[in-house]
Amino acid sequence: MKKIIFLFLFVSIFTNAQDATKVDLSNPHATIYTHLYFLQQDSYQPKNAAKTILGLEESAAIEKAIKIKKVLDGKGLFVDFNKIPNNPNYNDTIGYSSFYKYVLFPQRMPQVSVEKINGNWYFSSETVAEIDKLYKGVYPWYVEKLEKIIPSSGHQKFLGLELWQFIGLIILMVLSLLVFLIIKKIGFYFLQKLQLYFTKNTNFEVDKVIKKLAHPLALLASFAVIDKIFPSLQFGLDTNTWVFKIINIATTIFWIYVFLKLVQVVMRIYAEFTERTHSRLDDQLVPILHNFLTGIVLVVGLFNVLRLFGIDTTTLIAGATIGGLAFALASQDTVRNLIGTIMIFLDKPFHIDDWIEAGEVVGTVEQVGFRSTRVRAADTSVYQIPNSKLSEIVINNKGLRLFRRYNTNLGLRYDTPPQLIEAFVKGVREIIIAHPETRSDSYNVEFTGFGDSALLIMVNVYFKSLAWGVEQSSKHRLHIAIVKLAKELGVDFAFPSTTVTIEQFPEKKSLNLKYNTGQEKIDAAIQKVVSEFSNENPKEIT
């Protein structure tokens, strides 16, 4: 009886052991587990592992199965079985054409995948076709030769490593250092040539940035050498996993640094280009573009770093999209202002330093930002106008005028003789012609009407300079010359007054001004004033 019970227990244990190690191809999880389990040292059965490959002879299938594991181990790709689906009808609908297909490492090695064929899951035909190429990429031709020429003494342990691995590690470090120094020199040379090609001069600020850019590029080249050669040293999966994780994280960080410096270089070159243009609005675009591109680089870099730590960035992007939509709905004014900013830079209704009239705001444009535009009024106060509002209202851009128009009326006394009125008009015209800041081909000086207290002389001129300060200085010169002309001619300017005429009054005589209307006196006065005006030094007056 005891023998029967013992035999029953032995058969049960043996059967359970067989069930635990049987080939299972019913789902992606089972197929990948079967492949890796039967290639471990304590459960090495390559024939069973080869059953995960369909359509090949047993020897060829064994070779392919072993190469798949070596490629994964060589690149430090640790398979997390908790993330592998065990659904027999698993359907990957994200970016892949096959209905029943699972990719083990879609980012780092998308060529390795399993697919459902005739009810079972096998390594895909693409994986089987590409595995030899992948294997040669991870283990170059010299690996097999090294295995043959390494003597038995080379397999002795030294500091926990085989002697040949230790020597190979030292050679790899020296080779990486040489690549770093060479690429750094070559990279800086070509980057400097590229900078000179675009800027046409030597810019020391750009040179400093280029030196900082050449350094991480050389480090990236060194990491590429390590990434290529390190699998040849044939360390274990755990070591490779940590080494390649460190390499990938460092590579991502350095790429972020490179793109940040590249943005800095491009923006500096673009800034020099904008400085050569007449418009100053594109100068304001430089910091806005710089901040925008920097933000894109940091966000993309952060997602890549998170992906290396195993975080599902797809879920994060979906969450960020939903959160961004909610934020946009909650901050519609900010979104409108951003759109207004874009429209301002596209339409360019004004430029920096332009004098504009926008609704109730009148002043000089100082800065165009992401959200608002800063306008400084004549009294030096500052207005912050939201760009959404500024893109919708009517803007009168004084800065786009071809000339500055100045129109005024001069009032002469009613008792001014006609000869002196004509002389005064003629003299003002000649002053305008002689004025260096006025258009001599477009002006008007005419006796236009009778005011309440004066004979009205209209003066309409156009100043060449669009600068407000230069216009005021030009007005000053014009006004002084007109006042001198009136004094020389003996003409008085009128002011609001009331004249009472009394025909008879004891011992009082009526007011009767004496004007000199001699033609010689008139011509001499005009000639004198115009000559003095022409000989004046504008710098002394302004």
Image (spheres, helix red, strand yellow):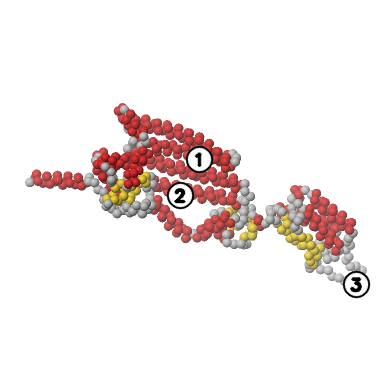
Mark closest to the chain's N terminus, 3 or 1:
1
**Furthest residue in direction right, as rendered:** 507
The amino acid type of the residue labelled 1 equals Leu
| Residue drawn at the location 76% of the way across and 48% of the way down | 540
CA–CA distance between discs 2 and 3? 97 Å
Q: Give residue 519's position: percent from left, percent from top.
A: 89, 58
Q: Give residue 522's position: percent from left, percent from top.
A: 87, 57
Give me the disc on residue 463. none
In the rendered image, the vertical position of residue 370 relative to residue 40, given as above or below: below
In the rendered image, the vertical position of residue 362 relative to residue 292, given as above or below: below
Q: Which residue is mark 2?
A: 299
Q: Residues within 10 Å of mark 1 (few under 14, many from 20)?
A: many
Q: Give residue 372's position: percent from left, percent from top.
A: 56, 56
Asked if residue 226 lies left or right of residue 188, the reply is: left
CA–CA distance between discs 2 and 1? 20 Å
| Residue drawn at the location 43% of the way across and 41% of the way down | 251
Q: Which residue is mark 3?
A: 504
Give me the disc on residue 213. 1
